[in-house]
Image: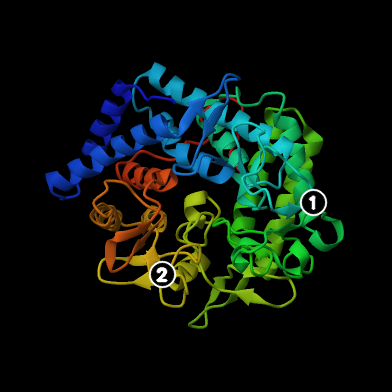
Amino acid sequence: MARLPDTLLDAVQARVLEGLADLGASDALVGEIAQRVVAYLRNTSETTVSVEEDGTTFVITGDIPAMWLRDSAAQLTPLLRLVVAGVGADEDRAELVALLAGLLRRHWQYLEIDPYANAFNRAPDSSHWDADETERENPWAWERKFELDSLSYGPDLAWRLWRATGDTSWADERFLPAARAILSTVRAEQHHEERSAYFFRRSGVPAQDTLAREGRGSLTTPNGLVWAGFRPSDDACELGYNIPGNHFLALALERLAELLEQVADAPAEADEARERAEQIRAALVEHGTIEGPTGERVWAYEIDGRGEHRFLDDANVPSLLALPYLGCVAQDDPLYLATRAAVLSRSNPCYYEGLYLEGVGSPHTPKDHVWPIALAVEGLTSAERGEKLRLLELMTRTDGGTGMMHEGVHVDDPTVFTREWFSWSNSMFCELALDLAGVERDRAGTHEGATERS
């Protein structure tokens, strides 16, 4: 497993302590937050991250020995913050860049092999779910649930790393084939019924773990959006077109286009990526909003292109709540603010309130469980520093005495939780703490050749 230098972790702790010093919080709380950031970064690097013989980076989720494309990028995003903000010595940050570039090269390898899989094995030693029925066998896949975020997190991370550092070591011989696999998949899934061969069936499981209609999912009508079988929670989409997933995919395709044009010298593929992004954005504007609970317009969570829609928000990212954090919309956008208000209310069937917690949960976990990931996202999308601090303190007080973040935590009893070890959740705590300390997520346009996104 990888190990972060002690000098870097010392610098992180000092930066967090300094960044939180002006908030009027107790020394004990500030110290606790800083210590947790260091502990979670150390835990992630030493227990989930490994550098393989080929130089790529393999990242397990925690208590599951497989790598999710979504989770792995999110787990290491705090490291990019440290690079962007210049935390630590030059040689320490160079080590972080190498880990991130190695992760991206592993993403490209997996996307070229199978752009429909969401989670992968370290080696091609067969699926964890041997009884799954799908249109092709892939011994690299832990499971083969098609989710839009699997196509999005890699290009987004590559773009942000490139913009911040100019590094292109991630752009190996697999990058262009992976980009072509992403584009081919988007092209097919904009017309799922007519052009896609994908189906997924799992026997003897709840409805959320398999797809209806013989594995094809609910019927959809093409409208420019991209179909997905599953949500970022790994639960089945109810209506096929996941709105936050399409938001993030459109952004990722725009960023992929810039990488294809300026790093890979692939103008034809860059043009297609931009065209697909434009189609998705136009469809989101035309079809993605609905009347909210108090009569205002809000973003839907899912639609089917046939007139049906659902309003909810799930704790897993991409989510409606997370749209500004991901860079998809402005934090003060009126449509987002109306959506946010509905998400953080009883209008959202995944919003729970209790004696200790209130926030967004997920159908993926039992009723009345709030996710620390959603609490972190709530803080990351708030303009108020005091609110960010409140949420960090809440997360520290509701860890069930374990010192770690979990998947879901019961609103009335923090000792009742799912997943004792969930690295993505730990990393989101780090993101919020670093954000509050002024350690920025991105720094655009800092190297020669980078251009501002229009």
Q: Nearer the viewer, residue 414 or 291?
A: 414
Residue under the image location 68 percent in, 70 percent down: 287
Image mark for residue 344: 2
Q: Is residue 19 visible?
A: no
| Residue 448 as seen in the image, left or right of residue 240 | left
Classify 386 as above or below 362.
above
Where residue 134 sits in the image (x, y, percent)?
Answer: 75, 53
The residue nearer to you, when weighing 125 against 174, is: 125
Q: What residue is disc 1 on?
A: 135
Q: Which structural element holds mark 2?
A: loop
- The quarter holding residue 423 reads top left
Could you tell which of marks 2 and 1 lies nearer the N-terminus? 1
Query: x and y percent of residue 369 in the render?
Result: 38, 65
Q: Amino acid at mark 1?
A: Glu
- Of all residues shown, which one is farthest toward the left? 27
Q: Position of residue 216 (x, y in %)?
A: 76, 63
Is 299 located above or below residue 21 in the figure? below
- Circle on res. 207: none
Residue 434 to residue 57: above or below: below
Q: Where residue 35 sits: x, y (%)?
A: 24, 38
